[in-house]
Image (cartoon, rainbow, N blue to C red):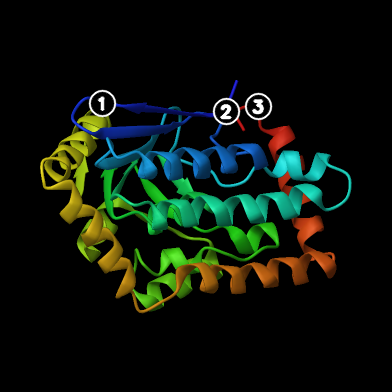
Amino acid sequence: MGSVTSTVHPDGVAEVVMENPPVNALSVAGWYEVADAVRSLGENQDVRVVVLRAEGRGFNAGVDIKEMQATEGFSALIGANRGCYAAFAAVYECAVPVVAAVHGYCLGGGIGLVGNADVVVASEDATFGLPEVDRGALGAATHLARLVPHHKMRAMVYTSATATAAELHHYGSVLEVVPAGQLREAALRVASAIAAKNPTVIRAAKESLNGIDPVDVKRSYRFEQGFTFELNLAGVGDEARDAFVERRRQDPAG
């Protein structure tokens, strides 16, 4: 059974839901599932807007490092990098707006998804962070920079600190912060407001807004990924991932 499901409602609002217990860290296949689901919905002329959300303890905990360390060679590392790249690009290039509904933790790859979304709604318990340096990797600062001011982004990358939904609302990157139990309702409300508009105009608006972005998010993220490969070749990445997996083994809730 896949970790991603999608549904299209009669009003043209579609939902893509990630669910991969225990922490919503996606496997290589899971990242491609997100990419395929979002792209196919954007190509569906009956779809006017996509809501990307998750079930479980948090929105997204990034890549499945356990899978990566249990796989011989570099196929899982390369797969995770390419899978994330595909998923982030699918959200950004989706022909219709994507509304991200974030609860709990949004880490690593989750930042890539949310940073490339068109609208972000979050629950009061949502936190956002890039713990990449603790994993011997780099990436998604491109997308974090779309959520927080530049120097805040740098501090978060260097320290692996997180930011709250309230902070991001203050910065203007999160549209609305609601109690956890009201998150899906809030996201669907925003999506329905978009879906009520002329779909041809909305699709044109999405394309035009991407066209005036000052940063090429795909190229920028690919540049970051190159340093992850360098760190892996240096042995730092593998050591950090092994340490992470060992801590997870000692934590029954992880």
Instruction: Kindly identify the residue that appears in the image at 58 percent across and 43 percent down.
Output: 31
> The N terminus is located in which quarter?
top right
The image shows a total of numbered marks equal to 3
Quarter occupied by residue 117:
bottom left
Q: Nearer the viewer, mark 1 or mark 3?
A: 1
Which three-letter amino acid code belongs to the residue tagged 3?
Pro
Q: Where is the C terminus found, in terms of image quarters?
A: top right
Which mark is first along the chain, 3 or 1?
Answer: 1
Position of residue 23 measured from the top left corner of the image (x, y, whole percent): 55, 34
Q: Residues within 10 Å of mark 3 (few under 14, many from 20)?
A: few
In terms of secondary structure, where does tag 3 sit?
Answer: loop
Which residue is under mark 1?
A: 9
The circle drawn on residue 32 is none
Residue 177: x and y in percent read 21, 45
Kind of residue indicated by mark 2? Pro
Identified at 66% across, 32% down, the residue is 251
User: At 36% from the left edge and 67% from the top edge, which residue is drawn?
Assistant: 146
Q: Nearer the viewer, residue 41 or 220?
A: 41
Check the image and report above or below for 108 versus 225.
above
Name the kind of residue labelled 1 in the image: His
Horizontally, residue 129 falls left or right of residue 207, namely right
Residue 5 location, x and y as percent? Answer: 46, 27
Determine which residue is flagged by label 2. Answer: 22
The first of marks 2 and 1 along the sequence is 1
How far is the residue under mark 1 from the one under mark 3?
A: 38 Å
Measured Cα–Cα span from mark 3 to mark 2 = 10 Å
**Residue identifier under label 3:** 252
Could you tell whether 164 is left or right of 225 in the image?
A: left
